[in-house]
Amino acid sequence: MRIDVTGLSVEIAGARLVSDLALHAGTGQFVGLVGPNGSGKSTFLRTVYRALRPTSGSVLLDGDDLYAMSARESARRVAALPQEASTEFDFTVAEVVAMGRVPHQRALARATGTDSDACATALAQVGASHLAERGYLTLSGGEKQRVLIARALAQQPRALILDEPTNHLDIAQQLEVLALVRGSGLTVLTALHDLNLAALHCDLLYVIESGRIVASGPPHDVLTPDLLADVFAVRAHRVRHPETGAVQLLFDRLLPTPS
């Protein structure tokens, strides 16, 4: 599914959080948003999964206006994994994943064989079938993220929106989660904190600073020393990943220029 965002701005309580943003994600592309803390990444993503309505601009899904759809229809197209996706009650993993089927069910209807099959398939995709009867709150951080991705996949969307999906995970879990998402074949739009992970996994990067897009394109073209100095206030040294050839970054503090 193609995602086209144009002229998007969000204003809350008189403060403009993002201004005139434009983004285009082609079918099956893995598109990353990077930028300093508070730059507007989460605000932008919330508009794409309808948690927040923009003040102006449009979000089109395969040419259809997101905000002209019913909530049920948009949830059949887009699944989201917010940054704070906590579950307060100790549901089983199977129950958590089954929540992804709600957009496909009639009110108060029982789960069908189709629902059960979709949940089982999603758990198998993320390698978590063996966790089905475990309590969600007993899982490790990496296991919880896999289960939440399974819930999103059970929703059978055409796009995934992920806000910092690797937060609080160790490096092996980070690589595993991003590989799972990449392997889904869906259009993916994600905010990432780690620039090296973004460079390894993303087809395109959009850099946000102070609520505006300041650069976009393939990671190799976007993650330049000059941009990283301007936006992140660090001195970056570019190297090539020995296996993938992807650009990787080594960082130093950006020291003030002597007067």
Image (tube, rainbow, N blue to C red):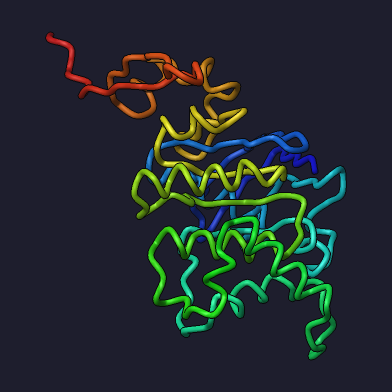
- Name, please, the residue furthest toward the front: 130
Q: Nearer the viewer, residue 202 or 65?
A: 202
Asked if residue 136 is positioned above or below residue 209 in the image, the reply reads below
Q: In which quarter of the image is the N terminus?
A: top right
Pinpoint residue 20: horizontal percent, then vertical percent.
63, 37
Pinpoint residue 114: horizontal percent, then vertical percent.
83, 73
Q: Quadrant of the C terminus?
A: top left
Q: Which residue is drawn at 59% across and 59% down?
A: 149
Q: Nearer the viewer, residue 146 or 206?
A: 146
- Name, please, the residue furthest toward the left: 258
Asked if residue 24 is positioned above or below residue 97 in the image, the reply reads above
Q: Residue at x 56, y 37 (%)?
A: 32
Q: Is residue 43 left or right of residue 79?
A: left
Asked if residue 232 is positioned above or below residue 39 in the image, the reply reads above
Pinpoint residue 40: horizontal percent, then vertical percent.
49, 45
Q: Nearer the viewer, residue 187 or 221?
A: 187
Choose top left, top right, bottom left or bottom right for residue 248.
Answer: top left
Q: Which residue is drawn at 62% across and 28% down?
A: 203
Asked if residue 173 is positioned above or below residue 229 in the image, the reply reads below
Count of numbered marks = 0
Choose top left, top right, bottom left or bottom right for residue 230.
Answer: top left
Pinpoint residue 170: horizontal percent, then vertical percent.
34, 49
